[in-house]
Amino acid sequence: MTVRIFVPKDAAALALGAERVAKALSSEVEARGIDATIVRNGSRGLHWLEPMIEVETAQGRIAYGPVKASDVASLLDAGLATGRDHALCLGKTEELPFLKSQTRLTFARCGIVDPLSLADYRAHEGLKGLERAVTLAPADIVAHVTESGLRGRGGAGFPTGIKWKTVLDTPGARKYIVCNADEGDSGTFADRMIMEGDPFVLIEGMAIAGIATGATKGFVYIRSEYPHAIATMTQAVEIAHKAGVVGTSVLGSAHAFDIEIRTGAGAYVCGEETALLNSLEGKRGIVRAKPPLPAHKGLFDCPTVINNVISLASVPIIMDKGPVYYKDFGMGRSRGTIPIQIAGNARHRGLYEAAFGLTLGQIVDDIGGGTASGRPVKAVQVGGPLGAYFPRALFDTAFDYEAFAAKDGLIGHAGIVVFDDTADMLKQARFAMEFCAIESCGKCTPCRIGSTRGVEVADKIAQGIEPEKNRELLADLCNTMKFGSLCALGGFTPYPVTSAMNHFPDDFRPVPLVEAAE
Amino acid sequence: MNLHVSSRDIGERTLDIVSGMKSLEGPLLPILHEIQAEFGYVPQECLPIIARELNLSRAEVHGVVTFYHDYRDHPTGRHVLKLCRAEACQSMGGDQLAERVKSLLGIDFHQTTLDGAVTLEPVYCLGLCSAAPAAMLDGEVHGRLDADAVKDLVAEVRA
């Protein structure tokens, strides 16, 4: 029997040498006459073990990692094809503690299936949600999503069902589903992983959204920094189209729905929904004032659902297993699961999907295993460049939209960047302002001017120039940006800055420079 | 890349690209991507043609080209090395690594080496935050970079 060996094609695995491993494996397997196929799967999310290869055995999949191309010969010598032991053998994949303790709903198939095999997708419960959706009235689909408690996973946390209902109830000859795949936040890669590892789940989610709201056209706006995701999504859409999953008749139903992949052009602000719509229309990615809401007047002034990748990719399982199944996970008003991305200076870096409610300390210390450098954790930034820096003192905060808001933070797209004690928080605060200055769309003054002034004030503090006065000025500037900016870029840049100032005041009191004696 | 194309060729090829894509909904960004893929940058000569064909003003097209970081108004070196400068890479020593790359190449960000071998660009997140510090060389991704690895990358582009 042909044995299947899995070598991830996820960009993180590729960055760590997976392509070389796949090539070495392919030629060794051929040279040795082993009856094996190499499947290029997505990543399981244990990135510190990438490239992590797996072999399918009667006992289940056995994992090995991190594998270098030079390890391939010895792995085959040891009996990789039958799952034999080796120094790099990690045992059964499903038994790995990092995976076993997860609740994988949205990422149920990621890393398991061949991303571009629709047959594999179907064999792993794929398309069941869409099959159900085509039998339901649009209002019933919307009711399902509303009842599930799903909230926008892009960061804003707005209830997805309510957004859909608004579009459903808004008359329009043409409506759109826009998938925001402009995942620009540092520390996040969940969108990229799902697009590279299980693209059909996103296509399925978008088709369900189309049927639910009466939209017939979908766009996936993917950032240009993700060429691998763009390639996989483009192929997947073609395959889905050929198979009749999307097109003039979705799964043979009376619903039409088409999907087009679009590439961003390196502007972070296009992750903001109205800037993204302008960009799709072929304009500068300038933020629009709301109202009108995109649900009323979105893309080309038509009613538009604009959702994040993970929000849309979570819909198929809600439709398949029912809203109650999904809602039963989580805490408070944060229902279901969230793919937490552990990044930066963490020992166990990768993607960990779990129900809302873990504490930050559990995530960083227990799951993430502390720092990669082995030094103490100083701060973690949660939610990307616009997210707050949390000190260890706040590690009891539960991973939940409201709990984080109560501590002046945000979970954003659920990326967590760990910093060890060598981090200089004044420098990080300065960077937040600098990043905002580089990426500001320029429409509103607090963001456009405030960010540049912020960099200057941070520099003055660092140079010891009237530090007390300048700290006050920085706090005041943050206040202006927070309440005066048009969108989250200017409005949330103060989060990393003020949190750094409040939680790490010592870093904002640099030792005064001693004039060198002449 | 870096082919010597005359303005007339640029005009004709631009017109071909625009004609092929102008029926798309919101065609400007896809057209500009295609033009950059064709020429390696967005030549000034393209702008009036695009404006005319899409019924836009030249100022509007110029505004879009200059808004987005991706579009270049001049050719790059033979290779483009993008170093991630965002927080996750900073937490793993990305800043020191960037300094090292700059000194190895003898250039700053947004510059091209005198021999035309490589252009160095900053990028704010490649989504490889779990494999930081990360870089992209001509579309190929590299993670967990250290001093030795960047030395190899630099040697590769210089070869």
Image (cartoon, coloured by chain):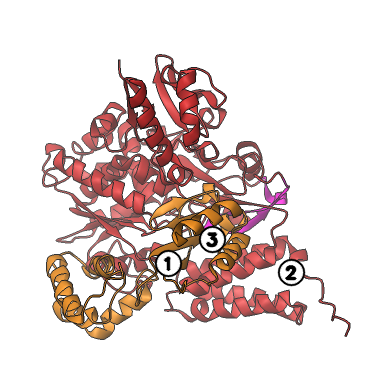
Chain colours: A red, B orange
Q: To which residue does mark 2 refer?
A: A508
Quarter of the image for the C terminus of chain A: give it. bottom right
In the image, residue A69 above or below residue A379: above
- Verify CB contact (< 8 Å) between mark 2 and mark 1: no
Q: To which residue does mark 3 refer?
A: B86
CA–CA distance in space, label 2 to label 1: 41 Å
Other-residue count near label 1 (Cα within 10 Å), few / some / many at <14 / 14–19 / ≥20: some
Q: Is residue A81 left or right of residue A179?
A: right
Q: Which of B11/B23 is in front?
A: B11
Rendered location of residue B30, percent (x, y): 24, 65
Residue at the farthest right position: A517
Mark yes or no: residue A301 visible: no
* In the image, residue A249 lies in the stretch drawn in magenta: no
What's under tag 1, amino acid-wise?
Ala
What's under tag 2, amino acid-wise?
Phe
Q: Is residue A393 left or right of residue A512?
A: left
Q: To which residue does mark 1 refer?
A: B117
